[in-house]
Amino acid sequence: MNKDYAVVIPCYRHGHALKAVLKALAVYKLKIYVVDDGNDAEEKKLLCEVTQANNVALISLKKNSGKGAAVYAGAKQALTDKFTYIIQIDADGQHCLADLEKLISLSNKYPHDLISAQPVYDQSIPKSRLYGRYITHFWVWVETLSFNLKDSMCGFRISPLKELISCIEQEHPGMRMDFDTEIMVRLFWRGTKTHFLKSPVTYPQDGISNFDALKDNLAISLMHSKLCMQMPYRLLKLYLQKSLFKPEDTISWERLNEVHGLLGMKIMMRLYQVFGRSFFMLCLPLIIAGYYITALPQKKASQKFLQLVNKRQKQLGMKISSSLSTFAHFLSFGITLLDKLSLWSDETKVKQRVEYAPGAEEILATHGKRGKLILASHLGNLDAARALAQKSHLPRVTALVFTDNAARFLKITRQFAPDALQDLIAVQKVTAALPCELDERLANGEYVALTADRLSPCKGRGGERCIYVPFLGRTCAFPQGPFVLASLLKCEVVVAFALKEHKKIRIYAHKFDDTVNLRRNHREDDLKFYAAKYASILEKYALSHPYEWFNFYEYPWIKEEN
């Protein structure tokens, strides 16, 4: 007998189904505790017969107290008997017990974590149950700001005993049908990871359901309300305990790893896919609220940027943007993220929502000749322009991105908008072969786009050289690389932005130069000239569209301008 693992089976009105469950478990030679959750006299008699026939321990509760109470009773007895883990199994015969060995193997691999089956349903599942599970999935994703908990309702799982009992006794979760979900969320908040194994689940045709549509749905709704209210504090406490946020005054964007701070990014896209844009917009403020509380470095960077915008607007005699808020800034980023990915999936939507600003289409036109280099930025949503080109069968726009910068976004793009990766070149560093590849695309009349407002990941390792030029009333570091590459490609260069205006995305374009020329004896001066020219154009649009600025890191400001 395995002395680490014990099986706990809460049982209420499932005595007949329990026979098959115990028969399937016999091969594993595990200690089994069946918990009689206050059954009537006839059912108690049946349970006594079944457990005695299979040499299984029976624990009886005086009254029906709920699934959670039954699991707790079995867990306490298992701990008293010096077991380390309990294997929780439902008594109704829905689970594929052939997967138990795989679950135990996962538990051996991750001894401090929760291991759970992830149900794969056949046609036997009632549609109401299937859709109801997705509602709970959604709220769990919100409560954890994570997709890590793939299914919180499955009753086939392995729990570390001490962590489980400590959580129950300190957190006081619901003890009925809300138990499985709440205990998994609360263990997550306490730092216990969960690993999942896909496993088939079948609903027996003659099965008995203990789910009370009114009482249990009400209890589950109250549970989610309670968890949502506690979520910001619990997640903040968890992240601080894990030292995700360091106390340095300046936290570089490389370490934040692009959009690391937006913990609910996958949640947002799943919301959009399952429930549509209207529901997404309804839930987005709640997700952003959790991010707003926990993303301290990004919040600080946003506040500093918005302060600089107001100060610079005042210096230039512009109309000052009043009531600029970091929360609204984050909210804008969430909406833009949706736009980045959703536009690729619908050709009609692109043509309805993306348009050219006056003169922009002519500036970008190639007239069948050599393509153009687009100097882009992290201001706005240039993916909208790429989507417009692809869906309208215009010359392709190839985007050059550093994989170190955008690893998370590339992963999500691959999952939710694979079309966006068709004309994208992801590189770790610029090689001698890259200009040749880009030159070939330009020769075919295509566009090449790369950002010129952010230093590459190798900057901190002594890799990329930068140029210091005025920007937003300060001296700021800009990368040399884009201008050096432009000089090698010998093509016309434009600066372009795609900015949200009145529920539409408008593409702006400025002619930068017929060709970037870096003179051998005046290379540094020429680089500074082009960087300053680019920074001047970028500043104009950053001031007019501050909420479209998505550099949520401490920008490398140097000093105040006189």
Image (spheres, rainbow, N blue to C red):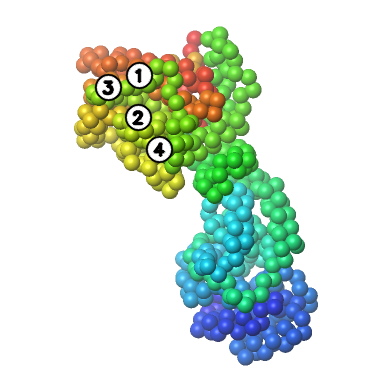
- Name the residue type under label 2: Leu
Q: Residue furthest right?
A: 62
Q: Position of residue 552 (x, y in %)?
A: 50, 32
Q: Nearer the viewer, mark 1 or mark 4?
A: 1
- Name the residue type under label 3: His
Q: Which residue is mark 4?
A: 405
Q: Are marks 1 and 2 in contact (CB under 8 Å)?
A: no
| Label annotation for residue 551 | none
Question: With 448 as the anchor, is 111 left or right in this view?
Answer: right
Q: Which residue is mark 1?
A: 362
Tell me what residue is drawn at x 44 percent, y 40 percent. 346
Disc 3 crowd rating (10 Å Cα; few below 14, some 14-19, many 20+) is few
Q: Are marks 3 and 2 in contact (CB under 8 Å)?
A: no
Q: Nearer the viewer, mark 3 or mark 2?
A: 3
Q: Is residue 163 in view from this perspective? A: no
N-term-proximal mark, 3 vs 4: 3
| Label annotation for residue 367 | 3
Tell me what residue is drawn at x 58 percent, y 75 percent. 204
Q: Gap in Å between the C-alphas at discs 3 and 2?
A: 22 Å
Q: Nearer the viewer, mark 2 or mark 4?
A: 2
Q: Gap in Å between the C-alphas at discs 2 and 4?
A: 13 Å
| Residue 319 lies in quadrant | top right
